[in-house]
């Protein structure tokens, strides 16, 4: 059985761990709040962009011979892979990289075989 000195040290250790955990929670909550506020501030821009794209699409529906409305087989493909810059996100980065590889193999096999698939990696943990 542990003596009183060992018990006091363990209690002290647990309390310091709790204090550290509380501080980490507060920092995470502040970062989450900041990210949520940034998203809320972007909503008017996203709505206006959707409105502009809708107007462009409506104007182009009359012109069926436009090169923008014709379906074409892609010769060159650019995959944009966005991962995080840091860890602590589980298998997120690995799953994103695997998903990009599966898309390249499954959707664009001819372009991949010809060497016409490029990858734009955003984030330190990608490819």
Image: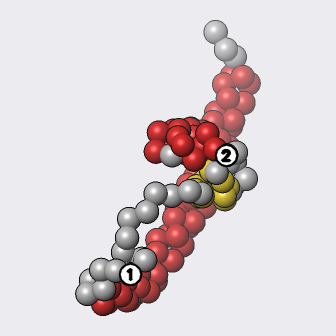
Residue 64 quadrant: bottom left
Is 18 placed above or below 59 here?
Answer: above
Horizontal side of 91 relative to 71 (left or right) equals right
Q: Earlier in the sequence, mark 2 or mark 1?
A: 1
Q: Is residue 81 visible?
A: yes
> Where residue 33 is drawn, which disc sits there?
none
Secondary structure category for the residue under label 2 = loop
Q: Where does the N terminus fall, quadrant-wise? A: top right
Quadrant into which the C terminus falls: top right
Which residue sits at x=27%, y=83%? 61
- Residue 68 is situated, as x and y percent measured from the top left of the image, at 42, 77
Task: Return the residue at label 1.
Answer: 66
Dot 1 lies on which element?
Answer: loop
The residue to which callout 2 is attached is: 115
* Residue 23 visible in the snapshot: no
Point out residue 120 in the picture as x, y percentages from the top left corner: 66, 58
- Of 115 and 33, which appears nearest the observer? 115
Q: How far across and how far down the image is residue 16, in percent?
A: 67, 43
Colouring scheme applied when the structure was drawn: secondary structure
Q: Residue at x 57, y 47 (%)?
A: 111
Label 2 vs label 1: CA separation?
29 Å
Residue furthest to the front in view is 65
Of 101 and 82, the residue lying toward us:
101
For the residue pair 21 and 126, the one nearer the viewer reads as 126
Q: Residue furthest top?
A: 1
Residue under the point 35% across and 87% down: 56
């Amino acid at each position: 059985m542990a003596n009183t000195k060992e018990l006091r040290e363990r209690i002290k250790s647990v309390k310091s761990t709790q204090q550290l955990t509380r501080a980490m929670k507060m920092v995470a909550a502040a970062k989450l709040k900041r990210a949520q506020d940034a998203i809320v501030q972007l909503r008017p821009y996203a709505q206006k962009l959707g409105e502009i794209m809708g107007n462009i699409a409506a104007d182009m529906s009359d012109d069926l011979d436009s090169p923008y409305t014709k379906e074409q087989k892609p010769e060159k493909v650019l995959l944009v892979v966005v991962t995080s810059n840091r860890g602590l996100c589980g298998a997120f980065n690995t799953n994103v990289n695997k998903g990009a590889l599966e898309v390249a193999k499954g959707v664009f096999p001819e372009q991949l075989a010809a060497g016409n698939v490029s990858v734009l990696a955003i984030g330190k943990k990608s490819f």
